[in-house]
Amino acid sequence: MNSFSQSLAFDGFLRIPQLASHRYCNFISDAISLTIGDRSSPFFRDLDDHCPDSFLSDIWSSHFFSSFPQDYVPDCLPAFLSSVINTDHLILLQDTWFCRTHQCSTSIPWHHDQSIEGPFFSVWISLTDVPLGSSLRFVRGSHLSGLRYLPASFFNSVNSPDVLSSMEQFYRSFHFDNNSPESFKHFAPVPTDLATNPDYQIIEVPTLKGDAIIFNGLVLHSLSSNGKVDTRGFVLRWVTPESVVSPYSNDAQIASKLLNIRLEPKTQIKDPFFKTYDFSLSR
Protein backbone atom coordinates (compact mmCIF):
# COMPACT_ATOMS: atom_id res chain seq x y z
CA MET A 1 0.00 0.00 0.00
CA ASN A 2 1.55 3.34 -1.06
CA SER A 3 1.46 6.46 1.10
CA PHE A 4 -1.48 7.93 -0.81
CA SER A 5 -3.47 4.73 -0.34
CA GLN A 6 -2.62 4.65 3.36
CA SER A 7 -3.75 8.23 3.93
CA LEU A 8 -7.00 7.66 2.08
CA ALA A 9 -7.66 4.39 3.90
CA PHE A 10 -7.07 5.77 7.40
CA ASP A 11 -8.12 9.43 7.11
CA GLY A 12 -10.83 9.04 4.48
CA PHE A 13 -9.52 11.96 2.39
CA LEU A 14 -6.40 12.98 0.52
CA ARG A 15 -5.29 16.28 -1.04
CA ILE A 16 -3.36 16.10 -4.31
CA PRO A 17 -1.68 19.41 -5.21
CA GLN A 18 -2.02 20.59 -8.81
CA LEU A 19 -3.66 17.49 -10.20
CA ALA A 20 -5.34 19.65 -12.86
CA SER A 21 -3.80 22.44 -14.92
CA HIS A 22 -5.07 26.02 -14.79
CA ARG A 23 -6.03 25.63 -18.43
CA TYR A 24 -8.27 22.69 -17.50
CA CYS A 25 -9.79 24.65 -14.60
CA ASN A 26 -10.61 27.60 -16.85
CA PHE A 27 -12.01 25.22 -19.48
CA ILE A 28 -14.44 23.61 -17.00
CA SER A 29 -15.28 26.90 -15.30
CA ASP A 30 -16.24 28.46 -18.65
CA ALA A 31 -18.51 25.49 -19.34
CA ILE A 32 -20.15 25.91 -15.94
CA SER A 33 -20.82 29.57 -16.69
CA LEU A 34 -22.62 28.54 -19.88
CA THR A 35 -24.61 25.96 -17.92
CA ILE A 36 -25.65 28.62 -15.41
CA GLY A 37 -26.85 30.79 -18.25
CA ASP A 38 -28.84 27.91 -19.73
CA ARG A 39 -30.37 26.38 -16.55
CA SER A 40 -32.22 23.70 -18.49
CA SER A 41 -30.85 20.72 -16.59
CA PRO A 42 -33.42 18.96 -14.36
CA PHE A 43 -30.74 18.70 -11.67
CA PHE A 44 -29.91 22.43 -11.64
CA ARG A 45 -30.38 23.85 -8.13
CA ASP A 46 -30.18 27.20 -6.34
CA LEU A 47 -29.26 26.22 -2.78
CA ASP A 48 -29.27 29.54 -0.93
CA ASP A 49 -32.66 30.63 0.47
CA HIS A 50 -31.44 34.14 1.33
CA CYS A 51 -29.45 35.29 -1.70
CA PRO A 52 -30.53 33.92 -5.08
CA ASP A 53 -27.74 32.75 -7.40
CA SER A 54 -25.14 32.76 -4.62
CA PHE A 55 -24.96 28.95 -4.34
CA LEU A 56 -25.67 27.01 -7.53
CA SER A 57 -25.13 23.37 -8.39
CA ASP A 58 -25.85 20.86 -11.12
CA ILE A 59 -25.42 17.12 -11.64
CA TRP A 60 -24.60 15.44 -14.96
CA SER A 61 -24.15 18.71 -16.84
CA SER A 62 -22.08 16.66 -19.28
CA HIS A 63 -25.25 14.82 -20.26
CA PHE A 64 -27.94 17.47 -20.12
CA PHE A 65 -26.06 20.49 -21.48
CA SER A 66 -24.98 20.01 -25.08
CA SER A 67 -22.19 22.59 -24.90
CA PHE A 68 -20.52 20.95 -21.91
CA PRO A 69 -17.17 19.47 -23.00
CA GLN A 70 -17.02 15.71 -23.34
CA ASP A 71 -13.33 15.57 -22.33
CA TYR A 72 -14.03 16.77 -18.80
CA VAL A 73 -11.96 14.09 -17.02
CA PRO A 74 -8.32 15.15 -16.48
CA ASP A 75 -6.07 12.79 -18.46
CA CYS A 76 -4.02 11.74 -15.47
CA LEU A 77 -6.90 11.17 -13.06
CA PRO A 78 -8.31 7.69 -13.83
CA ALA A 79 -4.94 5.90 -13.72
CA PHE A 80 -3.88 7.79 -10.61
CA LEU A 81 -7.14 7.04 -8.79
CA SER A 82 -6.91 3.40 -9.84
CA SER A 83 -3.52 3.12 -8.14
CA VAL A 84 -4.64 4.98 -5.01
CA ILE A 85 -7.72 2.84 -4.35
CA ASN A 86 -6.01 -0.34 -5.57
CA THR A 87 -8.36 -1.41 -8.33
CA ASP A 88 -7.87 -2.22 -12.01
CA HIS A 89 -11.41 -1.20 -12.93
CA LEU A 90 -13.14 2.15 -12.46
CA ILE A 91 -16.60 3.39 -13.36
CA LEU A 92 -17.30 7.12 -13.66
CA LEU A 93 -20.64 7.56 -11.94
CA GLN A 94 -21.32 11.28 -11.95
CA ASP A 95 -20.08 14.79 -12.60
CA THR A 96 -21.26 17.57 -10.29
CA TRP A 97 -20.28 21.18 -9.80
CA PHE A 98 -20.73 23.76 -7.06
CA CYS A 99 -20.53 27.51 -7.63
CA ARG A 100 -20.63 29.89 -4.67
CA THR A 101 -20.25 33.67 -4.60
CA HIS A 102 -18.93 35.81 -1.76
CA GLN A 103 -22.57 36.58 -0.87
CA CYS A 104 -23.38 32.96 -0.04
CA SER A 105 -24.63 32.41 3.51
CA THR A 106 -25.59 28.74 3.21
CA SER A 107 -23.44 25.83 4.28
CA ILE A 108 -23.64 22.18 3.30
CA PRO A 109 -24.34 20.32 6.56
CA TRP A 110 -22.31 17.40 7.83
CA HIS A 111 -23.23 14.33 5.81
CA HIS A 112 -21.81 11.49 3.83
CA ASP A 113 -22.73 10.17 0.40
CA GLN A 114 -24.77 7.01 0.70
CA SER A 115 -26.19 6.30 -2.74
CA ILE A 116 -23.65 3.49 -3.14
CA GLU A 117 -22.70 0.53 -0.97
CA GLY A 118 -19.14 -0.60 -1.49
CA PRO A 119 -16.28 1.37 -3.07
CA PHE A 120 -17.38 4.96 -3.71
CA PHE A 121 -14.95 7.88 -4.05
CA SER A 122 -15.31 11.53 -4.98
CA VAL A 123 -12.62 13.69 -6.55
CA TRP A 124 -13.16 17.39 -5.85
CA ILE A 125 -11.18 19.58 -8.26
CA SER A 126 -10.80 23.18 -7.15
CA LEU A 127 -11.46 25.45 -10.11
CA THR A 128 -10.52 28.46 -7.98
CA ASP A 129 -8.49 28.98 -4.84
CA VAL A 130 -10.61 27.84 -1.88
CA PRO A 131 -9.16 29.26 1.36
CA LEU A 132 -9.71 28.29 4.98
CA GLY A 133 -13.23 29.18 6.04
CA SER A 134 -14.61 28.26 2.63
CA SER A 135 -13.11 24.83 1.99
CA LEU A 136 -14.22 21.26 2.49
CA ARG A 137 -14.06 19.88 6.03
CA PHE A 138 -13.80 16.23 7.00
CA VAL A 139 -14.17 14.21 10.18
CA ARG A 140 -10.98 12.21 9.99
CA GLY A 141 -11.57 8.45 10.00
CA SER A 142 -15.37 8.70 10.23
CA HIS A 143 -15.77 6.35 7.25
CA LEU A 144 -14.49 3.55 9.50
CA SER A 145 -17.30 3.86 12.08
CA GLY A 146 -19.51 1.27 10.39
CA LEU A 147 -22.47 3.66 10.76
CA ARG A 148 -24.62 5.23 8.07
CA TYR A 149 -25.58 8.81 8.88
CA LEU A 150 -28.34 11.27 8.05
CA PRO A 151 -28.36 14.93 9.10
CA ALA A 152 -30.05 15.22 12.51
CA SER A 153 -32.95 17.23 11.08
CA PHE A 154 -34.22 14.10 9.35
CA PHE A 155 -34.95 12.64 12.77
CA ASN A 156 -36.82 15.72 13.96
CA SER A 157 -40.52 15.27 13.21
CA VAL A 158 -41.03 19.04 13.42
CA ASN A 159 -38.96 19.52 10.28
CA SER A 160 -41.38 18.11 7.75
CA PRO A 161 -40.22 18.25 4.10
CA ASP A 162 -42.35 21.30 3.32
CA VAL A 163 -40.49 23.51 5.82
CA LEU A 164 -36.93 22.37 5.16
CA SER A 165 -34.36 24.75 3.71
CA SER A 166 -33.32 24.45 0.07
CA MET A 167 -30.16 22.64 1.13
CA GLU A 168 -32.02 20.11 3.25
CA GLN A 169 -34.60 19.58 0.52
CA PHE A 170 -31.75 18.92 -1.90
CA TYR A 171 -30.18 16.38 0.43
CA ARG A 172 -33.49 14.70 1.20
CA SER A 173 -34.42 14.49 -2.50
CA PHE A 174 -31.29 12.68 -3.56
CA HIS A 175 -29.97 10.88 -0.50
CA PHE A 176 -33.01 9.53 1.29
CA ASP A 177 -36.08 7.58 0.22
CA ASN A 178 -39.03 9.44 1.72
CA ASN A 179 -41.31 6.57 0.74
CA SER A 180 -39.50 4.08 2.96
CA PRO A 181 -39.71 5.26 6.58
CA GLU A 182 -38.36 1.90 7.72
CA SER A 183 -35.00 2.88 6.25
CA PHE A 184 -34.50 5.10 9.31
CA LYS A 185 -33.50 1.88 11.08
CA HIS A 186 -30.48 1.80 8.80
CA PHE A 187 -29.27 5.28 9.80
CA ALA A 188 -28.00 7.22 12.78
CA PRO A 189 -28.22 11.00 13.17
CA VAL A 190 -25.01 12.92 12.54
CA PRO A 191 -23.48 13.57 16.00
CA THR A 192 -24.33 17.07 17.21
CA ASP A 193 -21.06 17.46 19.14
CA LEU A 194 -18.63 17.05 16.25
CA ALA A 195 -17.00 20.41 16.99
CA THR A 196 -16.61 19.90 20.75
CA ASN A 197 -16.08 16.17 21.30
CA PRO A 198 -12.35 15.29 21.31
CA ASP A 199 -13.21 11.87 19.86
CA TYR A 200 -13.83 13.63 16.54
CA GLN A 201 -11.07 15.35 14.59
CA ILE A 202 -12.29 17.92 12.08
CA ILE A 203 -9.79 18.76 9.35
CA GLU A 204 -10.40 21.64 6.95
CA VAL A 205 -8.62 21.28 3.61
CA PRO A 206 -7.94 24.57 1.79
CA THR A 207 -6.97 24.22 -1.85
CA LEU A 208 -5.39 26.18 -4.63
CA LYS A 209 -6.72 26.29 -8.17
CA GLY A 210 -5.98 22.88 -9.73
CA ASP A 211 -5.65 21.00 -6.45
CA ALA A 212 -7.83 17.93 -5.94
CA ILE A 213 -9.25 16.20 -2.88
CA ILE A 214 -10.01 12.49 -3.13
CA PHE A 215 -12.36 11.27 -0.43
CA ASN A 216 -14.29 8.20 0.58
CA GLY A 217 -18.03 8.70 0.15
CA LEU A 218 -18.61 7.55 3.73
CA VAL A 219 -16.33 10.08 5.44
CA LEU A 220 -18.40 12.83 7.05
CA HIS A 221 -17.82 16.10 5.22
CA SER A 222 -19.30 19.58 4.96
CA LEU A 223 -18.83 23.05 3.51
CA SER A 224 -19.10 26.05 5.79
CA SER A 225 -20.60 29.36 4.66
CA ASN A 226 -18.46 30.88 1.97
CA GLY A 227 -16.18 33.30 3.77
CA LYS A 228 -16.59 36.25 1.38
CA VAL A 229 -14.84 34.74 -1.65
CA ASP A 230 -16.11 33.37 -4.95
CA THR A 231 -15.36 29.64 -5.30
CA ARG A 232 -16.02 26.84 -7.75
CA GLY A 233 -15.49 23.10 -7.47
CA PHE A 234 -15.97 20.28 -9.95
CA VAL A 235 -16.62 16.81 -8.53
CA LEU A 236 -16.20 13.49 -10.30
CA ARG A 237 -17.64 10.47 -8.46
CA TRP A 238 -16.26 6.98 -9.02
CA VAL A 239 -17.23 3.39 -8.20
CA THR A 240 -15.86 -0.06 -9.01
CA PRO A 241 -17.50 -3.25 -10.33
CA GLU A 242 -17.89 -4.37 -6.70
CA SER A 243 -20.08 -1.35 -5.87
CA VAL A 244 -23.85 -1.74 -5.67
CA VAL A 245 -26.73 0.72 -5.63
CA SER A 246 -27.97 1.46 -2.12
CA PRO A 247 -31.56 0.43 -1.38
CA TYR A 248 -31.98 3.43 0.94
CA SER A 249 -31.55 6.32 -1.47
CA ASN A 250 -33.58 8.17 -4.08
CA ASP A 251 -30.58 8.70 -6.35
CA ALA A 252 -31.05 5.56 -8.39
CA GLN A 253 -34.75 6.15 -8.98
CA ILE A 254 -34.27 9.76 -10.03
CA ALA A 255 -31.28 9.01 -12.27
CA SER A 256 -32.97 6.02 -13.88
CA LYS A 257 -35.94 8.14 -14.89
CA LEU A 258 -34.15 11.30 -16.02
CA LEU A 259 -31.21 9.60 -17.72
CA ASN A 260 -33.24 6.71 -19.14
CA ILE A 261 -30.85 4.18 -17.65
CA ARG A 262 -31.13 1.10 -15.48
CA LEU A 263 -30.05 1.36 -11.83
CA GLU A 264 -31.58 -1.10 -9.42
CA PRO A 265 -31.11 -1.36 -5.64
CA LYS A 266 -28.59 -3.94 -4.44
CA THR A 267 -27.25 -4.48 -7.96
CA GLN A 268 -23.96 -3.61 -9.64
CA ILE A 269 -23.71 -0.66 -12.00
CA LYS A 270 -23.51 -2.06 -15.52
CA ASP A 271 -25.51 0.35 -17.66
CA PRO A 272 -23.41 1.40 -20.70
CA PHE A 273 -24.23 5.04 -19.91
CA PHE A 274 -21.39 4.99 -17.36
CA LYS A 275 -17.87 5.18 -18.74
CA THR A 276 -15.53 2.41 -17.60
CA TYR A 277 -11.73 2.27 -17.34
CA ASP A 278 -9.70 -0.95 -17.40
CA PHE A 279 -6.08 -0.82 -16.24
CA SER A 280 -5.56 -4.58 -15.84
CA LEU A 281 -3.36 -4.81 -18.93
CA SER A 282 -1.16 -1.87 -17.94
CA ARG A 283 -0.06 -3.25 -14.56
Image (spheres, rainbow, N blue to C red):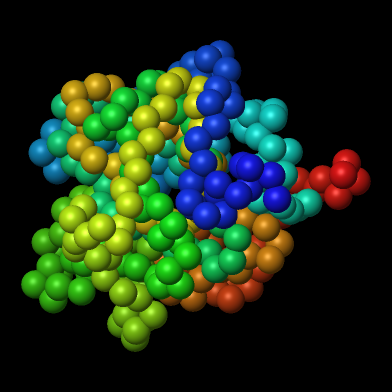
Tell me the residue at 76%/46% (across/down): 277
Using the rendered image of the protein, determine whether residue 122 is visible from the camera's viewpoint.
Answer: no
Q: Is residue 197 above or below residue 22?
A: below
Q: Closer to the camera, 139 or 117?
A: 139
The extreme front residue here reads: 198
In the displayed structure image, the side of residue 108 where residue 23 appears, left or right = right
Residue 55 coordinates in the image, percent (x, y): 26, 35
Q: Closer to the camera, 35 or 136?
A: 136
Where, by quadrant of the figure, is residue 9 drawn?
bottom right
Where, by quadrant of the figure, is residue 187 drawn?
bottom left
Residue 203 coordinates in the image, percent (x, y): 35, 43
Residue 163 coordinates in the image, percent (x, y): 11, 61
Where, by quadrant of the figure, is residue 184 drawn?
bottom left
Q: How many marks?
A: 0
In the displayed structure image, the side of residue 10 where residue 35 appears, left or right = left
Q: Closer to the camera, 40 or 61?
A: 61
Q: Is residue 159 above or below residue 186?
A: above
The extreme top residue here reads: 23
Using the rendered image of the protein, determine whether residue 20 is visible from the camera's viewpoint.
Answer: yes
Residue 107 coordinates in the image, percent (x, y): 22, 43
Tell me the residue at 24%/65% (across/down): 191
Tell me the residue at 63%/73% (across/down): 267
Q: Is residue 35 above or below residue 189?
A: above
Q: Is residue 254 above or below residue 44?
A: below
In the displayed structure image, the side of residue 197 where residue 158 appears, left or right = left
Tell me the residue at 40%/52% (across/down): 140
Q: Quadrant of the C terminus?
A: top right
